[in-house]
């Protein structure tokens, strides 16, 4: 009767240990991926914004005198 309780406790301890190790190694990787994605997104936003401003000037006809 004591074996299932000890087995459950052992599985719980192993789960907590694996969770701590995964958090220590994977959390910085997730933040690195997030930062790279944020930087790429900001660069794409800047390209979109500045190309949008330049498009309006090309559509105007030349001034006739």
Image: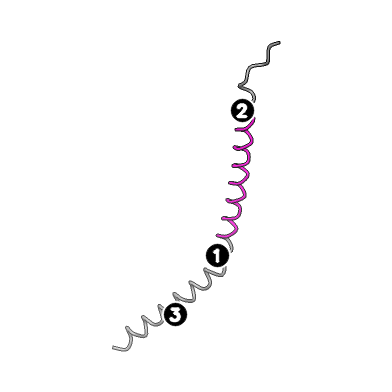
Residue mark closest to the camera, 2 vs 3: 2
Can you give x and y, in whole percent of width and height, for residue 48 in the image? 59, 37
Sequence order check: which comes first, mark 1 or mark 3? 3
Along the viewing direction, whichever of 31 and 8 lies nearer the viewer:
31
Residue at 55% x, 64% y is 27
Q: Would you say 20 lies left or right of 60 here? A: left
Which of the 4 image quadrants contains residue 24? bottom right
Find disc 1 in the rendering and name its residue: 27
Which of the 4 image quadrants contains residue 14? bottom left
Q: Residue furthest top?
A: 65
Q: Classify the position of the C terminus by image quarter.
A: top right
Badge 1 density bin: few <14, some 14–19, many ≥20, Cα 10 Å:
few
Along the viewing direction, whichever of 37 and 65 lies nearer the viewer:
65
Cα distance, mark 1 to mark 2? 42 Å
Residue 55 has which mark?
2
Residue 45 on the magenta segment: yes
Cα distance, mark 2 to mark 3? 61 Å
Cα distance, mark 1 to mark 3? 21 Å
Residue 54's place in the image compared with 31, above or below, is above
Q: Would you say 2 lies left or right of 30 here? A: left
Badge 2 density bin: few <14, some 14–19, many ≥20, Cα 10 Å:
few
Find disc 3 in the rendering and name its residue: 13
Range drawn in magenta: 30-56
Q: Residue furthest left?
A: 1
Can you give x and y, in whole percent of width and height, for residue 23 in the image? 53, 69
């Amino acid at each position: 009767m004591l074996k299932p309780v000890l087995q459950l406790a052992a599985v719980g301890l192993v789960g907590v240990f694996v969770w701590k190790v995964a958090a220590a190694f994977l959390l910085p990787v997730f933040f690195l991926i997030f930062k790279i994605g944020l930087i790429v997104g900001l660069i794409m936003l800047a390209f979109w914004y500045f190309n949008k401003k330049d498009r309006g000037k090309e559509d105007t006809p030349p001034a006739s005198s």
